[in-house]
Amino acid sequence: MTTRRLIEMKRRGEKIAMLTAYDYTMARILDQAGVDVLLVGDSAANVMAGYATTLPITLDQMIYHAQSVMRGVQRALVVVDMPFGTYQGNSKQALASAIRIMKETGAEAVKMEGGAEIRESIERILCAGIPVMGHLGLTPQSINKFGTYSVRAREEAEAEKLLADARMLDEIGCFGIVLEKIPAALTARVTEAISIPVIGIGAGNAADGQVLVTQDMLGLNDGFAPRFLRRYGHLGEEISNSVSHYIIDVKSCDFPNEKEQY
Ligand code: KIV
């Protein structure tokens, strides 16, 4: 999978399936199942480390997750989130962070949250030949500014800014944009207005593709149940049942049996 192929998929009207991955074992399963894009999201801060926000995860930690994912992937395009504080300062710092991600992980692209405010950083990274995916709408790295995880761009002024940012990201050469938690009608406007794929999360079905956090869609995180989330499994329950069964077998001396020993 390549960034060019994703753009062709949009032209052909073929939807793009994207999921998050943070480790080798899961990346291998998702890749073999045929997912088009794997995002090493900074949601690793929540899902893997248990933080309340995505802000604490570091560049070194993102690189570790991305290296693990890359070892499990043969087909999917791997995109790595640039973590909070590694690109907002200035474009030189942004380029240095992106180069570290590309050199040390072998991933194919980076993702950055924001529009006009970070244009200079995005352009500098693009100039170095590094593909960039944008991220607009609810951008979790700005949670302290928003003060809430509720739907963004309901007001016309914010919707217009988002549309202008999406057009700008397309014009300067990004290969795709994630739109998070915005009204479906606005996603339809953006998807129609730009030539690069729009990948939605909580953004309706007019987008060119969808992304979910894998642990959420597999039912490993029961506490998180926003309206946009469809659960495709109940793995939390399954793991808990399997572990209870194992404990019973160990305590009753049923495991290991004769065939399971040397
Ligand atoms: O970090 C992440 O998982 C993301 C997705 C929600 C798009 O940015």
Image (spheres, rainbow, N blue to C red):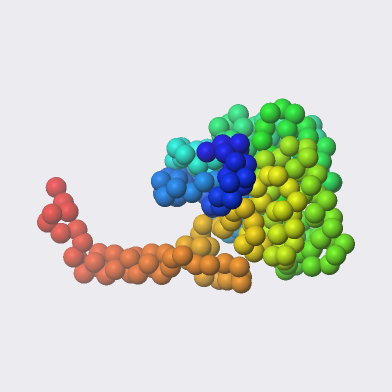
Give x and y (percent) for residue 75: 47, 39
Q: Residue 107 appears in which quarter of the rendering?
A: top right
Residue 71 relative to residue 229: left or right: left
**Number of numbered tags placed on the structure image:** 0
Give x and y (percent) for residue 217: 51, 63
Q: Residue furthest right?
A: 157
> What residue do we see at 78% from left, 40% from top?
171
Q: Residue furthest front?
A: 12
Q: Residue 195 appears in which quarter of the rendering?
A: top right
> What residue do we see at 34% from left, 65% from top?
243
Give x and y (percent) for residue 222: 52, 70
Q: Is residue 254 above or below residue 8?
A: below
> What residue do we see at 41% from left, 46% from top?
32
> What residue do we see at 72% from left, 65% from top?
185
Is residue 184 visible to us here?
A: yes
Give x and y (percent) for residue 237: 41, 70
Q: Residue 153 appears in which quarter of the rendering?
A: bottom right
Residue 161 relative to residue 98: left or right: right
